[in-house]
Structures are given as structure tokens and as C-alpha cells.
Image (cartoon, grey):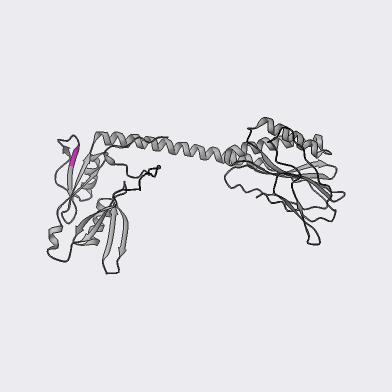
């Protein structure tokens, strides 16, 4: 969404993205005062400024910067020079102008706070409305308003409100998507006599393409799936849901034929996704009666099988990833021994 430019240089907060020239803006202007603490209270409590810097210097001096509520330029409140006549630097026209979208309202507000104005807001020859006010040391400032400024601020405010509403809706929809995706993960764990297992998925973002599942095959068999869909965010979450539906709709009809299941899953994933979409997947089936585990690793990170004797068996890939090739096949490794311990399969 493009923000319309505001007139008279009011918007000094936008960063240029092209980086053709170094960032360059006004940092602060200096105003000399007699008593920094007394002046600080005036600028904060009567003008409504905010404190930006209040630093004690090694020399014993004090550096103070204050800023009006909007914008990024600041005013440094400095004690008058000790040499010569310090009064000649104090109580002058600072040549500093503030601008506001409603000069009459700002005039009433500051007057109620005890700020002394030279005259009420009035029309200027150059087309705007202006007045002048002083701080406690007689340093004077200009205050101006323009119809174009008011319209520009209102336009910018509407754009900001629309942007924030869009961001709020996007965050709400993302939270709904996160809740929906969390329900796609297994809610029921098939009971095994000889195996304890658990699974958890913590997405890098609110939603993503990581996926795991537990599939009850009946007769003492169950499969666990770990997969990672290409990409991040909403797009990969949708692909993850496609893969999950693909697996769950077919696994019962191919209980004894994991290769046929994966060939069918690959074909559907290939047909239903873009050419650059793919998923790595590890499908492992556990036989609770024989205490055997056989698996197919489709381009996923190697799982680690931790044996009772502390040796490690790597569950290395037996095929390439799913979804990139229409004609695809895989191997199933059934050589694992029954004295396995709980397998550990990383997803990263």
C-alpha cells in the first residue's frame, strides 16, 4: 500500500529503500537557556515534548535533547556560553517553526498550559495560518498550519488505519490457520505393547510445511510419518495439508504395500502442485508383534535408530523427494533387527 507524500516536509520518518545516497536528515537544533532543569520542565510539561537525551558529560555539563510529539528532529537545550555575554544568545528568535494540522486547537491547548503567545493565530500573506510563542527564556518559535497539511495528515492517518486493520485481519487469519493446522497433526496415538513414542512439531513461523503423523494400520501395525514440504509460511502449510490428506485417504488400502502407497502419493502430489513443489518424507512402519521396523526415506534427513548396544543405524534415503517426478519409485528397507530402541528422526 503506497503512502501519499505529506506536504511541507512533515514526514521525516520514511526510509528510502534504494540506498543510492546515504541517509540524511536533520538531527537537532540548539537553543540556549539559562536553567536547563527549569527549561526541561517547560518543554516536557507545558509544550508536551518528550525527552530524547539527558546525559551528564565528563566535563560536568549536561546534554539535553527534547522533541515534539511527532517527527524526528530534536532541540538541544544548552546553557549559554560562559565566555563573553551569555545573554546575547538567549531570548532570541530561534527561526524554528513548528507545524500542526489544527493550529487553533494547539493554540488553545498550549495557552491553557501557560505558554505565552505573541498573538492569536492569524492568516499570513503566504496562505497559511500562523502565530508565535516563547519559552521561559524568551526564545521564540513560530507555529503554523496549512489546509494542505491538514488534508495530507488526514490522508496519511486513513492510510495508516487501513494498514493496521489489514495487518490485524492478516494476524487473525494466520492464527486461525495455525489452529487449523495444529488439528492436522495426530490427535490420537495408537497403543503399542512394545513401543513408547511421542511427536511434537514446533513451526519456525505460525504455520509451515513441517508435518508428522501416526497411522494406525490395525493388527499390531502402525506407521509414523515425518515430512517437510518445500517453502515456508502459508503456501507450504497448504501443501502440507494436501500431503496429509493424500496420505490419510490412501494408507488403509495399501497397508501391506508401502511402495504402492508412496508411488500413489507421489503421483497425486505431482499432479496437484506446481512444478517446483516437493516434499521430503520418511515413512516407517512398526510391527508390534515381531518388533520390527521397516521404512522408506524419500529424500529426508537420515533418521537415527539407537540400538540397545548403543550402536546407531542411519535410516538413509531410499528414494528421491516426492512431487518432482511423475514416474517415481522407492525402496523399502526391512533389514532392521527386533532389538531396536526408540528411533529418533530429526526434521531439520
Question: Looking at the image, is 238 positioned above or below residue 203?
Answer: above
Residue 167 placed where, x, y %? 47, 39
Question: Looking at the image, is 239 positioned above or below residue 68?
Answer: above
**Magenta extent:** 126-130
Of 235 and 142, nearer the camera is 235
Residue 233 placed where, x, y %? 57, 41
Where on the picture, by quarter, is residue 181?
Answer: top right
Where on the picture, by quarter, is residue 298?
Answer: top right
Question: Looking at the image, is 324 positioned above or below residue 344?
Answer: above
Q: Would residue 250 be found to the left or right of residue 136 on screen?
A: right
Where on the picture, by quarter, is residue 227?
Answer: top right
Residue 235 placed where, x, y %? 59, 37
Q: As drawn, which residue projects farthest toward the front?
A: 20
Confirm whether residue 92 shows in the render. yes
* Residue at screen point 79% across, 48% down: 191
Residue 120 placed where, x, y %? 16, 41
Q: Would residue 124 be found to the left or right of residue 236 on screen?
A: left
Of 85 and 190, nearer the camera is 85
Residue 343 shown in magenta: no
Q: Quadrant of the N terminus?
A: top left
Amino acid at each position: 500500500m503506497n503512502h501519499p507524500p505529506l506536504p511541507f516536509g512533515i514526514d521525516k520518518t520514511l526510509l528510502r529503500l534504494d540506498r543510492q545516497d546515504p541517509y540524511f536528515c536533520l538531527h537537532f537544533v540548539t537553543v540556549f537557556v539559562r536553567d536547563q532543569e527549569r527549561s526541561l520542565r517547560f518543554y516536557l510539561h507545558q509544550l508536551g515534548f518528550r525527552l530524547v537525551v539527558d546525559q551528564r558529560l565528563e566535563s560536568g555539563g549536561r546534554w539535553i535533547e527534547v522533541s515534539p510529539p511527532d517527527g524526528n528532529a530534536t532541540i538541544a537545550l544548552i546553557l549559554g556560553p560562559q565566555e563573553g555575554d551569555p545573554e546575547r544568545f538567549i531570548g532570541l528568535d530561534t527561526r524554528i517553526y513548528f507545524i500542526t494540522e489544527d493550529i487553533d486547537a494547539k493554540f488553545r491547548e498550549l495557552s491553557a498550559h501557560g505558554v505565552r503567545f505573541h498573538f492569536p493565530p492569524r492568516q499570513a500573506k503566504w496562505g497559511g495560518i500562523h502565530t508565535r510563542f516563547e519559552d521561559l527564556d524568551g526564545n521564540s518559535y513560530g507555529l503554523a498550519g496549512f489546509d494542505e497539511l491538514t488534508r495530507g495528515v488526514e490522508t496519511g492517518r486513513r492510510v495508516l488505519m487501513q494498514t493496521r486493520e489489514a495487518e490485524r485481519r492478516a494476524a487473525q487469519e494466520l492464527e486461525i490457520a495455525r489452529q487449523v493446522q495444529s488439528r492436522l497433526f495426530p490427535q490420537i496415538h495408537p497403543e503399542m505393547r512394545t513401543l513408547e513414542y511421542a511427536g511434537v512439531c514446533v513451526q519456525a513461523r505460525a504455520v509451515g510445511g513441517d508435518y508428522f503423523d501416526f497411522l494406525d494400520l490395525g493388527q499390531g501395525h502402525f506407521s509414523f510419518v515425518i515430512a517437510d514440504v518445500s517453502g515456508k509460511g502459508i503456501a507450504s502449510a497448504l501443501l502440507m495439508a494436501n500431503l496429509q490428506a493424500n496420505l490419510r485417504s490412501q494408507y488403509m488400502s495399501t497397508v501391506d504395500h508401502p511402495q504402492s502407497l508412496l508411488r500413489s502419493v507421489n503421483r497425486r502430489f505431482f499432479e496437484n502442485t506446481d512444478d517446483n513443489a516437493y516434499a521430503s518424507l520418511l515413512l516407517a512402519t512398526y510391527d508390534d508383534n515381531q518388533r520390527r521396523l521397516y521404512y522408506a526415506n524419500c529424500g529426508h534427513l537420515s533418521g537415527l535408530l539407537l540400538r540397545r548396544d548403543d550402536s546407531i543405524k542411519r535410516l538413509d534415503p531410499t528414494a528421491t523427494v516426492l512431487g518432482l517426478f511423475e514416474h517415481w519409485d522407492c525402496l523399502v528397507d526391512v533389514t532392521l533387527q527386533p532389538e531396536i530402541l526408540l528411533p529418533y528422526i530429526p526434521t531439520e
